[in-house]
Image (cartoon, rainbow, N blue to C red):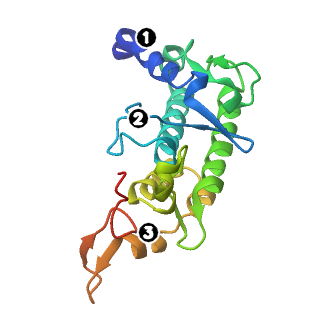
Amino acid sequence: KEFLDAYGDKLRLVLDFYSEADRWVLRGSSHLLQQRQYTEWKDSIKQEGVSSWTNLQLIEAITKLLVLSESNIDVARAFTGAKLFGPRFGMSDSQVTLNLSIPGAIPWLKMYLKQWTNEIFDEFYNETCGLLTELSPSNEAEEPVAHISHIDAQLQWLSATAHDPELQAKISLANITKAFLTMDSDTNIIAVSGINADSWPPSE
């Protein structure tokens, strides 16, 4: 409680950062978080477009916040007043202000988080390899990355969907193992690759 009292305003600002309309892009009928150069703290910091990994990280962070809020009223109160991007959560207003103490608010948000997770799967799933691709690019220079899968996105999918076996099963451990691990005859791991390609494109 002392931490929440001292830093609640900072925690609310984290969510507020992602509530601005210019951080989102409409792909088909789906509002997805987009990144520009240097807007996300990650190794691919210059990428521009919709990142499967970044979207799944935000989904997991909000999910964990909701789970904590269900069992701890201090957490729910600390995030009262924080903002979310309204259209992502079924609202016509550009921003929606959180009040997790309202009956039904948390199940409602969880429903839209699951919808968002399914939309990430639909946007990024590559049937050929059974994995999520790295990026849905916003410019031609990033187009080669759209055909590459990164191990981080697969692991982030497993983490973000750990509470939902039906969702989690959409990306199989067998496909992840096949794409990124090299094993010897005794199934000992002898090498791990970050991507399912020989190398990153020159733009990366």
Inter-mark Cα distance, 2 to 3:
28 Å
Alpha-carbon span between mark 3 and mark 1: 39 Å
In the rendered structure, find residue 199 and report the number of the disc placed on it: none
Disc 2 marks which amino acid? Gln
Closer to the chain start, of discs 1 and 2, is 1
In the image, residue 195 lies at what x, y percent?
37, 63
Q: Residues within 10 Å of mark 3 (few under 14, many from 20)?
A: many
Q: Position of residue 144 (x, y in %)?
A: 47, 59
Q: Nearer the viewer, residue 101 or 119?
A: 119
Three-letter amino acid code at the position of disc 1: Asp
Please give the label number shown on residue 37.
Answer: 2
Comparing labels 2 and 3, the label whose residue is closer to the camera: 2
Q: Are marks 1 and 2 in contact (CB under 8 Å)?
A: no
Mark 2: secondary structure: loop
Residue at 52% across / 17% down in the picture? 79
Point out which mark residue 176 bears.
3
Q: Amino acid at mark 3?
A: Ile
